Image (spheres, rainbow, N blue to C red):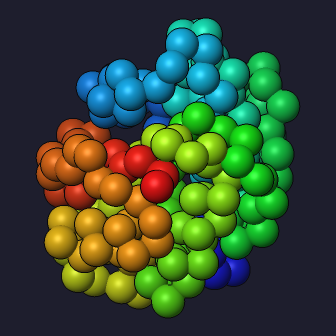
Amino acid sequence: MDTDTLEFYETNAEAYAAESLTHDVLDIRGRFIARLPKGARILDLGCGSGRDSFAFSRLGFETVPVDGSENMCREAERYTGLPVRHVRFSELDYQEEFDGVWACASLLHVPSAELPHVLNMVRQALRIGGIFFCCFKEGTFEGERDGRYYTDMTSVRLKEMLENCGFSVIDQWENTAFETGTRWVNAVSRRL
């Protein structure tokens, strides 16, 4: 993630957290957790406000939230009551510790040239057979937009990238989410 994007979240953490708490992702979370064992250990990668970490924790999952922005970590800790680890995607150091990795609207800030490395770090964090969810804005744009760096994805490109990094895509769909009219590409995959 580039420094301008991190600075955006450092500067706007409180407002961004408050706004993201209004987004309803219950259906998307359901498609992910339906594939996890009871009490699974979940890494919430780029947890932002902590909205999803809070939900996973309330459902009985052992949840480990992480974020690259120190101020977002503070917002997530305040909301969830959970300890939140400050770590950048490219610095993940987990080894087969999680049954699931949830990356909701977070990896879209990673430049496409760096995504294979980050996806390999995600793969290493998952136990064999572990479940990985990620989503990207739909399209082919890559660059700065609204003060942040974005890598948009098509369904075909996302599937190819996941498969090239050792995942098997088991559910993929597009939707319009967050009442903004933005199209999203979503994928649930399994670590091979």
- Whether residue 12 is visible, yes or no, is no
- Residue 136 x, y percent position in the rendering: 34, 61
Viewer-proximal residue, 111 or 43? 43
Q: How many numbered discs sit on the rendered protein?
A: 0
Q: Residue 62 is drawn in which quadrant?
A: top right
- Residue 146 x, y percent position in the rendering: 42, 72
Q: Compared with residue 144, is residue 80 higher up or lower down, i.e. above or below?
A: above
- Name the residue rendered at 59%, 35% in the picture: 99
Q: Compared with residue 8, is residue 140 higher up or lower down, i.e. above or below?
A: below
- Name the residue rendered at 67%, 52% in the picture: 125
- Residue 153 x, y percent position in the rendering: 27, 72
- Name the residue rendered at 35%, 68% in the picture: 163
- Whether residue 99 is visible, yes or no, is yes
- Name the residue rendered at 46%, 66% in the picture: 166
Viewer-proximal residue, 151 or 157? 157
Viewer-proximal residue, 3 or 113? 113
Viewer-proximal residue, 71 or 98? 98
Q: Quadrant location of the N terminus?
A: bottom right
Q: Compared with residue 57, is residue 127 higher up or lower down, i.e. above or below?
A: below
Q: Residue 22 is drawn in which quadrant?
A: top left
- Residue 121 x, y percent position in the rendering: 65, 65
